[in-house]
Amino acid sequence: MSPIPVTQSWQRIEAWLAQHAPSTAALLLPPAAREEIGAAERTLGLRFPPDLVDLLRLCGGSAEGPFDFGLGGPYRLHTVAEMTEKQLTMTEVVGAVGEEVMDGSYWHRQFLPIGNWTGTYLLVLDCRPGPGYGRVGRLAEGSGTSFGIWDSLADLLAAQAEALANLTALDHWAPVAFDGRLSWGIVTNQHPAPRSLLRLAAAAEQPAEPAPPPWRYVPVPEAGWVGDHPGFRLTFVAGVSGPELLRRYGAEDDVAVPRSRQEADDAARRWTSGYLPVVRTGMAGDWAFGFETGSGEADRPEVLRRLSAGTRAVRVGYDRDATTLAVLADGELVASYDTRRPERREGRGPGLPAAALRRAGLLPLDTERYPDQDVAAVLDLLAAEFGIAMDAALLDQPLLSAHVLPVLADQPHTRGGEFTSSHEPVIGGALAFAAEGPLRAAVLEQAGLLAAEVGLDDCPPIAEALATAAAGKFAPATDENALGKLLRTLAAEARAAAESRSDPVARDLLTEDERRAWQVRHGAALAIALATGTPVRSAAPVVLSGRLDPHWRTVFMATLGEEAVPVDAVERLAQREAAVAAEQQARWAADGAAGGAWPVLPPPATRPSRPGPQLGLGLGPVTLPSGGPVRGHGSPLVVPAGTVTAVSLDGLPVGPPEPGDGTPASAG
């Protein structure tokens, strides 16, 4: 079948823009002159496909702006001059890397960039003579160029005209008409019932072979027990027991078992343990200690806050070339120390007297000794100042240990969209100035729709939180309530799904669609928790940005109602943004006049290093020793009941195990 002519498709696109997105239509540029097109062809040594020439004779590109015209999705249509400049730049820059990346897999001298998105993604035409001449491809910076969606620009224009007319997807982009402008939303095909790696782990009859560690570490006998580890966290808590310390880390009450260091390391790298971090614990006088390798739970402020609640805690961190120390009292940082910056100490109290640091050779730092020797100096300091008598030989023995379900972050890693006066003026104005009550109701409705999109709407903690918030009460998540435990479990599911990708034993247990589904679910749950437990104006951008339906704006504004938004909301938003920008500029100017806001710190001191390699590239598949079980099995079920089922997943669509899912791959 002959392709639809470019002129016919472009007329449909222009008519649609005029009716539904006049602001975008206003950014279309006048047709390019034939002379300009011919000059570009001569400069580049290319013959432009006739489809492109036809389009440029109808439209010379799109001016740049937050609502410019995107071709093939959000790729702003280049002018002839931009096509020429970008082609020359790409050929020069990529060519300097080597001819091996100029074969068409990444770039080719006869590729022509006709559009771009965010500066790192290009829409390209293949101008090489042959059967692929004129086809449309996409280049992702760092990945390369792919073809196969559209055989010609005429095909793309015809598909785009149809997508606009019916508001249907164009490949993985969905056109959105709102507020007189055209934008594009990513089409997310959420897996409705991804399999749960944590459920599969709990059902496994035998522990799996540990995943290979990401780094090869060669122990350094000369460094003593410190040389057995590329890094660790050793945390002391006064006046608590070992089981209580594990509970504060996030372990369940009934899942602790003795493990050696190697057994703990292996357990944390098994899919049958959900890749959950393992903490071992013992006693140093009146202080319980927690020991971690391969994880950094004690680096997290929220964990240190829990550990030191109602008491004192001291955390020692070691990472080959640096030793750190943090002292806390009842959730508050009292003092900190870092061998890389010994002169900088933070905290609200005299927890580390300078005289004590001097006696330990930590202030000034004794730069003649090996970095691993700083650990002994720090432990001597703790013995002298806090009475912590740590026998390092304990670490070589089996210690009570548990997998921990990481606690909630103080500040979840969530990010809302850019709802500014230039990018999203209507939504931005509403979020900034709409009446509180209607805005909260509209955001909660969007949170409920988001829950349904990702399969969380029938999950009891989510449903209860939404109902409580709809009744006018906050429903914040805590580490111990049902909503908080669900968030912790979803975070563990998302992490386990991601970790399984690089585990040769587990990578086939989930599909990539299922892995993505757990990431999306976790992000959605965090957004919903913000909507139900925090002020609406801070939660709204995160909730709205999380929606999978690209047409949410129309529903949101209809629910909010015109009467809830001041008529001058957009103008007031622009004024507020201008005032904030002016204040920032003034602050920068003042900082510059004062000699700069950021102090210039001297580089860390050069330290001697132990001879021989210590860290290398990742290991290949781990082979089991012949005969006997893998060290670290410990018990028939590495994940005791309750470890990864801290919250019921009832009501959460989870795919059933498939035959063989609960059986680890054979060893070796």
Image (cartoon, rainbow, N blue to C red):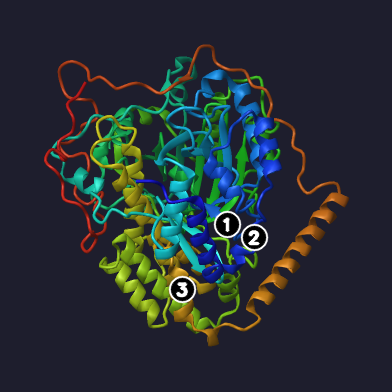
Q: Callout 3: few (<14), some (14-19), or many (20+) C-alpha neighbours within 10 Å?
A: some
Q: What type is the residue that disc 2 sits on?
A: Leu
Residue drawn at (82%, 52%) of the image? 591
Task: Label 2, secondary structure: give it.
Answer: loop
Whole-number angstrom distance, CA of label 1 to CA of label 2: 7 Å
Whole-number angstrom distance, CA of label 3 to CA of label 1: 20 Å
Q: What type is the residue that disc 1 sits on?
A: Phe
**Upstream in the sequence, badge 1 or badge 2?**
2
Pair 3/1: label in front: 1
Check if mark 1's residue and mark 2's residue have beta carbons within 8 Å.
yes
Horizontal side of 134 relative to 374 (left or right) equals left
Q: Residue under circle 2?
A: 27
Q: Residue under circle 1?
A: 69
What x and y, as percent, mark residue 413? 49, 54
What x and y, as percent, mark residue 533? 44, 70
**Circle on res. 320:** none
Residue drawn at (45%, 77%) of the image? 442
What x and y, as percent, mark residue 223? 49, 19
Which image quadrant for residue 378?
Answer: top right
**Circle on res. 554:** 3
What x and y, as percent, mark residue 209? 23, 29
